[in-house]
Image: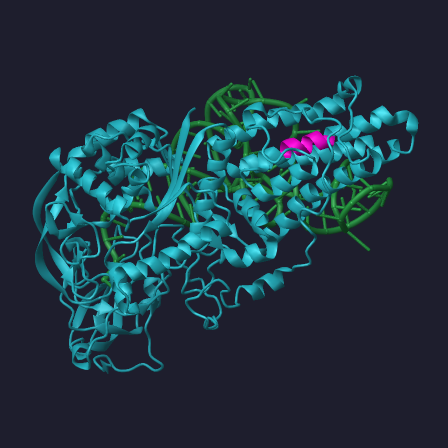
Amino acid sequence: MSRFYITTPIYYINAEPHLGHAYTTMVADAVARAHRLMGEDVFFLTGTDEHGQKVERAAQKAGLAPRAFADRVARSFEALLPEINASNDDFIRTTEPRHYASVQALWRSVRDNGYIYKGKYEGWYCTVDEVFVPETQLVDGRCPTCGGVVEKISEESYFFKLSALQQPLLEHYRSHPEFVTPAARRNEVMAFLEGGLEDLSVSRTSFTWGIPVPDDPAHVMYVWFDALTNYMTAAGYGSDDPLDQARFEKFWPADVHLIGKEIVRQHAIYWPAFLLAAGLPLPRQIVSHGWWLMEGAKMSKSKGNVVRPHDYIARFGLDAFRYFVFREMVFGQDASFTDEAILGRYKADLANDLGNLASRVVTLLHRTCGGRVPQPSPALLARSEERAVLDAASALVGQVKAAIGTFQLSVALRDIWELVGLTNRYIVAREPWKLAKDPDRRAELETSLFVPADALRVIAELLRPFMPTTAGRMLEMLGCPAHPASWSTLAAGTLQPGTALGQTAPLFPRIELTVEALRDMAHEPTASSTASPAKPAPQAAPAAAPAPAPAATPAQEAPVAEQISYDEFMKVDLRVAKILEAERVPKSKKLMKLRVDTGLDTRTIVAGIAEAYEPEALVNRTVAIVFNLKPAKLMGIESNGMVLAGSAEGGRPFLVGFETDLPPGSRVR
RNA sequence: GCCGGAGUAGCUCAGUUGGUGAGAGCACGCGUCUCAUAAGCGCGGGGUCGGCGGUUCAAGUCCGCCCUCCGGCACCA
């Protein structure tokens, strides 16, 4: 029996689960279920990523030990799985003993092959964020994320010889064009690879919440070395148990790592590089999907437009929710999650088309055929209308398999709905309710009901990966066994005449929900959240100020800076300044070169506001600046200070201004 | 700025290696059946296929230039 191993990313536990996590897991689930139906031995893995500084600090803030904190948040991710009917075979946590053993085994293997060396991580260290900041990212000698003070520190660190693997990786990419899909993502990775690779620092001594480096416990491993290895751990890597070893032999390498597009590089470069270094086989395919946008804008917690799967599942039912996300997102592209769209899909596709079709067919059968599958006439089945439906049903099996094989779930569902439409048209053409009135046309009646019933059976079977519960109910209504044939034996025309049908009940009841009602829902407190019972702060008018909705995984959130004393704050000399000249920095997208009057001197400041402001609109404008910032060079221009601006996460910057124009040089505090 | 992707009916999208008058679903309008969840089915309106130029007997489909949006890199205070 061939096997199929598919993974989701392991989700970083710095936030509660949201649509992005749910979506990735649901897609993996549908694909896993489909492969099971194709007769493969499937291993479907998901889990949580629990180490790292951010977790250590979040735990501190919560007054918990890291492990206790991790236990709590990991539970909320695990609790999401039954809610979306995920059929995962395992749930891995990076804090489990088996994972420690696995990661350390991989480390030793990579090290023994000469790909790890000890060096000095010389760099600028931000004491606020507790991270090293690459020299090139320093902003006027300060931390780019929090603006805090950085110190030159040299920390002992282990390095991974990523640079030595550029050629092997390129060769692998050239010989395996399907390795990263869709192609757009592959192109990006290739471009990055061709640009050259630098060695990767893979250990830290600045925090302890991680997996210790073998033979040097003062170091813990850097997050990606730890996290990515989960895919092998769950398959049995690093275990002494012969059963685990056999399992690893069977399931490694994985067939598919399903990920969001924001973590392509880690999966497409780091991960295969680690494996190459260890002499292990590479996964067959890295498949990345797009992001869900909210009403066309990116989703962000700060904007308060994060979709909570629970809310929609409660209104529409799980299967309708699953159908919507599968049907709506075109593979590889971003999709918009709108109330109009989900409402439209529910009413048109599910209630009107599919639900009503099942309802009318089964009701007719109960009324006219004694609640049993009718006996079709071979001669009548040979007519073109009948053939058209049954042939389409037969062909559909292959179409759906092919679409799922390339992760085009929306295409699979679109194809299935073509059969739904065809079946509805067939019924209207045959008008069985009229045939039922004429005893002489009994054979015609039975044939004309057998055909749609059989088509419904095929539809239900093919819907099983997408809407397991609904498919089960449909099959029950048609009197089919609870766990019938796999897809390999699925063929049209095989419904058994004489089989007793189940009771009919609406699959997707009509709902009177309106878009307005759904909108209101978005502002209700989270029903499933135990974290904050308080109502979210009322949102101001939604400006165009979005932020990415990391679809899944090691999503990095901007940390909140530590408290500082008044004295510390007063070290920053903030001043009013007036812009005298402004011009875009050539060849730069974001940088604007400004000439400002600070009241004390006239100086040049480079600011990253060129995307949001026209130079003409800046001249004569009064702004706030950091006066005593160390000079820095940006695109070869020396910048003496910094212009203050605010921005929503990922949004355009807005300059800080004053209600009235103060004279240049005035202190700001 | 460089690299990549995308720009097709109001909306979401299909459109194989260039070739019957440019499509689907939704929404909208009209009609119709009555088995069915006031669902189904039929018909219809509506598009300079981002713009300009070129190759060709023939281009949404190839080439060049330009515009817009998205992403990656450079880069971001």
Q: Is residue A453 magenta?
A: yes
Which of the image's four quarters has the N terminus of chain A? top left
Q: Is residue A416 left or right of residue B63?
A: right
Residue A650 visible to an observer of this rendering: no
> Where does residue A570 sit, x and y in percent of width and height?
18, 79
Toward which corner of the image does residue A642 lie, by quadrant?
bottom left
> Where does residue A322 sit, x and y in percent of width and height?
54, 46
Q: How many marks?
A: 0
Q: Is residue A208 left or right of residue A336?
A: left
Q: Nearer the viewer, residue A152 or A669?
A: A152
Q: Which chain is green?
A: B
Of the chain colours in the picture, the one used for chain A is: cyan
* Region in magenta: A452-459
> Where does residue A637 sit, x and y in percent of width and height?
17, 58
Toward which corner of the image does residue A273 lie, by quadrant?
top left
Residue A244 visible to an observer of this rendering: yes
Q: Nearer the viewer, residue B4 or A451?
A: A451
Tell me which colouring the rendered structure shows.
by chain
* Rendered residue at 25%/69% (across/down): A561
In the image, residue A21 above or below residue A578:
above
> Where does residue A647 sit, x and y in percent of width and height?
35, 65
Q: Is residue A60 left or right of residue A75?
A: left
In the image, residue A384 above or below residue B9:
above
